[in-house]
Image (cartoon, grey):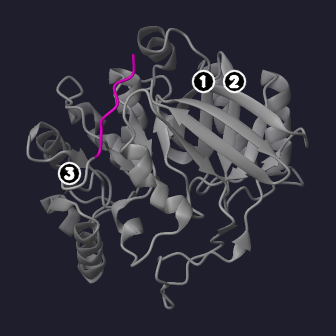
Amino acid sequence: MIYYPLLSKGETIGITAPSSGAPEQLHPVVREAEERMKKRGFHTVIGHTVWSQNKAASASPKLRAKEFNSMMKEQSIHHIVPVWGGELLIEMLEYTDFKKLDKKWIMGYSDTSVLLLAITLKTGLATAHGPNFVDVRGELMDETTAKWMEVLSAREGESVVQSASSCYQKEWDHANPTSCIFHLTEKTEWKTISGKEEAFSGRLLGGCLDVIRHLAGTPYGNVKEFREQFTLDEPVVWYFENDQMNATELRRTLVQLKLAGWFTECAGILFGRSSANEPVDHYTVEDVYSVLAEELNIPIVYDIDCGHQPPQMTFVNGAFAEITASNGWGKVEQFFT
């Protein structure tokens, strides 16, 4: 079975930096997020790693893991939201105490998804792929981003519906901040490789492909064991986002995961919007999706609300989900069972 934490107003959220921390010039951004979270009814405890950044990480792998382990064991800290992603979270996995994980939400995306997926696969504890701490520092939150609170507050046996956003952010414009941080200027359009309506269901797993691909073949990426131990071999619905890979590197990555067995009993795949996916010799990302759909004989939905072009839905690793997509629109209902 999957174990679901429960978020309640008034609880304390631990803020740590298992990947990158905040250089000094960005400390005010962290303080701003801290203040917004307080106004939304949550207390925060900010770890030491958040305030430092050197050589592509907040601290040594052992120190990052030590702070994370400590927050997971500390009873006065109810949930954990990393400040943001980065580059080298995978370094701390071997020092992470997977045997003593309390029932707490851990939420984030980008490099943080390495930790999220590893925890769910090894322990059956649900984790949340959603906004990082600094992404909720706006005076307001758009409807899609704001769903993170409803998702994390759902009780076991309940379900939460999330629908496609109306608009998304194509690129950052830090010089002109908005009340919700993001600049949602482009029309959202969910697409299917078949060009037809698609509907499928299964247990959600996923994250940022650039980094979670490195879990395959390690003790932290055993999808087969997870399915046998925690989901009675139910099919998987994968959700992925691509931060930096071009079309051929993306293809190599997906073939690797296929050969590693990650797509055994896969019911369908969701791909997030991306500013990457550059074509190589006229080989496009749509070519990548098409050949994968044919190889696996599954539906593929792409340009969904997930990843580095916000806003993004909150996907719960381990939750059972029903997905529908048609005519540029889509819906995900997650069941906490």
Observer-side mark, 1 or 3, equals 1
- The residue labelled by disc 3 is 60
How crowded is the residue under tag 3: few (<14 C-alpha within 10 Å), some, or many (20+)?
some
Range drawn in magenta: 1-7
**Residue 186 image position (x, y, % from top left):** 72, 73
**Residue 82 image position (x, y, % from top left):** 30, 55
How crowded is the residue under tag 1: few (<14 C-alpha within 10 Å), some, or many (20+)?
many
Instruction: Give the label on residue 267, or none.
Output: 2
Amino acid type assigned to the residue bearing label 2 in the image: Ala
Q: Which residue is depicted at the point 45% across and 29% down?
A: 336
- The mark that comes first in sequence, 2 or 1, is 1
Quarter holding residue 151: top left
- The residue labelled by disc 1 is 236
Hey, which residue is sitting farthest bottom in the picture?
A: 175
- Mark 3 falls on what kind of element? loop
**Residue 254 image position (x, y, % from top left):** 67, 34
Quarter holding residue 45: bottom left
Q: CA distance from mark 1 to mark 3?
A: 34 Å
**Residue 98 image position (x, y, % from top left):** 24, 27
Left or right, 16 with respect to 239, comes to left
State whether residue 249 is above or below residue 300.
below
> Does the rendering let one see residue 70?
yes
Q: Are marks 2 and 1 in contact (CB under 8 Å)?
A: yes
Foreground residue among 14 and 89: 14
Instruction: Give the label on residue 259, or none.
Output: none
Left or right, 133 with respect to 160, comes to left
The quadrant of the image that shows the N terminus is: top left
Q: Are marks 1 and 3 in contact (CB under 8 Å)?
A: no
